[in-house]
Image: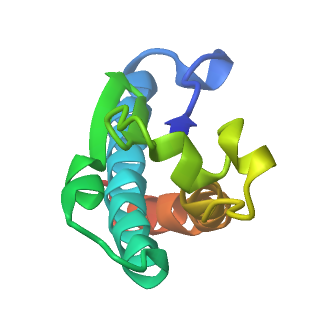
Amino acid sequence: MEVTVNTAGPVFTGQASALVTRYTQAGVQELADWAEGEVHRVLGQVLRHPTGYYESRVTVNRVSGDSIAITDGGVVYGPWLEGISSRNQTTRFKGYSTFRRVAERVEKRADRTFAAIFARGGL
């Protein structure tokens, strides 16, 4: 899952650009922290025999200044758990769709998160 916000265009010139960048980074970080917690919460609900390994691999990584990715660190069975592996097509297990479901929730929450950051004056 990746959250990207473009900070380009006529509105983002001069001093406003630095301020918007700070607000954007704060919003992206707040959303990423929430999403990481949400992934852990959902995994806690769906995993039947958790060992703790998969959950421990879920991390937030900054991809660029305004882009953060939440991943499972490339765990080999991650695609199978998510339901996007070719093995899911040949077995009864269709995956948990954890990251996809959380991504939808992040999209719904983004406007509210950024509005709250601007309302409280940024950081």
Measured as percent of width and height from the top left, residue 27 is found at 41, 51
Image quarter for residue 63? top left
Q: How is the image coloured?
A: rainbow
Q: In which quarter of the view is residue 24 placed? A: top left
Question: Percent x, y for residue 51?
Answer: 22, 67
Rendered location of residue 11, percent (x, y): 62, 25
Task: Establish if 10 lies above or below 93.
Answer: above
Number of numbered tags placed on the structure image: 0
The reply to whether residue 1 is in sight is no
User: Looking at this view, is 83 or 98 the one in front?
Assistant: 83
Determine whether, in the image, residue 49 is placed left or right of residue 78.
Answer: left
- Relative to 89, is 65 above or below? above
Q: Residue at x 44, y 59 (%)?
A: 118
Most distant residue in the right direction: 89
Question: Which image quarter holds the C terminus?
Answer: bottom left
Q: Is residue 86 left or right of residue 119?
A: right
Residue 44 is at least partly visible in this image: yes
Tell me if residue 61 comes above or below residue 105 in the rendering. Answer: above
Residue at (29, 34) in percent of width and height: 61
Of residues 42 and 64, the one drawn nearer to the viewer in this rendering: 42
Please determine whether, in this image, residue 103 is positioned above or below residue 40. Answer: above
Which residue is most to the bottom?
45
Judge left or right: residue 89 versus residue 27.
right
Residue placed most toward the observer, 29 or 10:
29
Question: Residue 66 versus residue 51: which sits nearer the camera?
Answer: 51
> Where does residue 89 sit, x and y in percent of width and height?
79, 46
